[in-house]
Amino acid sequence: METLFRRLLRLMPRLGLHVTDLGPGTAVVSRRGGRARIPVDQGADLLVRNVDRYSVTGAGKDMWVVQGTKPGKAPEPSGGWTGVRLGDTGAHLLLNDHASADERRFQLAAGAYLCSQHVAAMLEAYRVNCVFDVGANAGQYGKRLRRFGYTGRIVSFEPTSDAFARLERAAKDDPDWQVCHFGLGREDAMMSIHTGWNSMNSLLPPSDYGRGRYKRFARTQTEEIEIRRLDEVMEKALDGITGPRPYLKMDTQGYDLEVFAGAGERIADFVGLQSEVAALRLYEGSPGMAEAIAVYERSGFGISGMYPVTREETTGRVVEFDCVMMRADAAPAKG
């Protein structure tokens, strides 16, 4: 005798619904696009809209990759993906056959992700409620902070006109993201910045090494910009925050130590910082990595993470690192 459940299943297609019967007492009903079951292991099925457009590849114990393919294209061969267990964290890295084809690009992409994840973790652990984003360009850093879960205030500084216009657009719908159309440095001044170098605009000229590495340095334009001291803008930036715990991110193409110097004694207010330090100098007069880190350490900051930003293709040498540093005595007590 046919059950009421089965009769309902037979009726649903007449109403324009698609039914995928999964077994006694279980079915999936969808409004459009027929579904199909792909068994992947005992007790495990995948439900896909069109079986001909998907391939399933094992990626380790209890893991499968479902990959969409273009109509008529053969599915990817089994074994094209590998699941790499990341210690005992419970996380797995899924790699396909293309990941090892460009080791440099893969490492830099992984480093960028790990740096963002680490910064987000430090902001939470140190209860940061205001990030000073110095050298904001078009707002890439602020948007990344939001994607990784930071919800506190962001104050971004970008002196060049074109980049600032894009920064304003990036922040316009975020009520706790302030933008400032000037740069930061050791002294209040009007200065000339090299532009036309995309995200590498700098107050410093390129070094011989930089000119050899980047063709964009061969031609340049300049723009007059305003420079202010960090300690003079902190009160306004932190206004309304109870118990401010600021974090300083600097990415100013060789000018980070000048920004740092402009904080004066108020650098002690920051619980952490992030600076792009140079193993190989792209800009004339910029500090080397050891010099920059030594200055930060003398002010009480200690390294919590180092992540390569750029690397030479031929030699493998790192050109610049993102250096994350925290003030240990500012870490909130556990418990």
Image: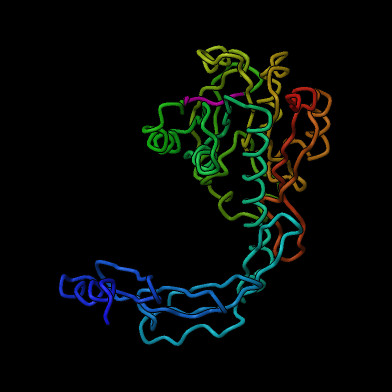
- Residue 9 in the figure: left or right of residue 147: left
**Quadrant housing the C terminus:** top right
- How far from the left and from the top, in percent, is residue 147? 51, 43
Q: Residue furthest left?
A: 14
- Residue 246 in the figure: left or right of residue 139: right
Residue at horizontal 23 percent and vertical 71 percent from the top: 8
Residue 100 vertical position relative to residue 258 in the rendered view, above or below: below
Residue 23 vertical position relative to residue 227 in the rendered view, above or below: below
Residue 250 vertical position relative to residue 109 in the rendered view, above or below: above
**Quadrant housing the N terminus:** bottom left
Whether residue 137 appears in this view of the structure is no
Whether residue 110 appears in this view of the structure is yes
What segment is highlighted magenta in the picture? 179-184
Q: Which is more toward the observer, 335 or 170?
A: 335
Q: Give the total of numbered labels.
A: 0
- Residue 291 in the figure: left or right of residue 283: right
Residue 131 vertical position relative to residue 170 in the rendered view, above or below: above
Q: Based on the displayed image, in which of its 4 quarters is residue 167 positioned?
A: top left
Q: Which is more toward the observer, 114 or 16?
A: 16
Q: Residue furthest front?
A: 1
- How far from the left and from the top, in percent, is residue 317? 77, 57
Residue at horizontal 65 percent and vertical 57 percent from the top: 110
Q: Is residue 180 magenta?
A: yes
- How far from the left and from the top, in percent, is residue 106? 65, 63
Q: Based on the displayed image, in which of its 4 quarters is residue 29 positioned?
A: bottom left
Q: Which is more toward the observer, 188 or 26?
A: 26
Mostly what secondary structure, the magenta segment? strand
Q: Is residue 250 magenta?
A: no
Residue at horizontal 75 percent and vertical 42 percent from the top: 305
Q: Which is more toward the observer, 198 or 29?
A: 29
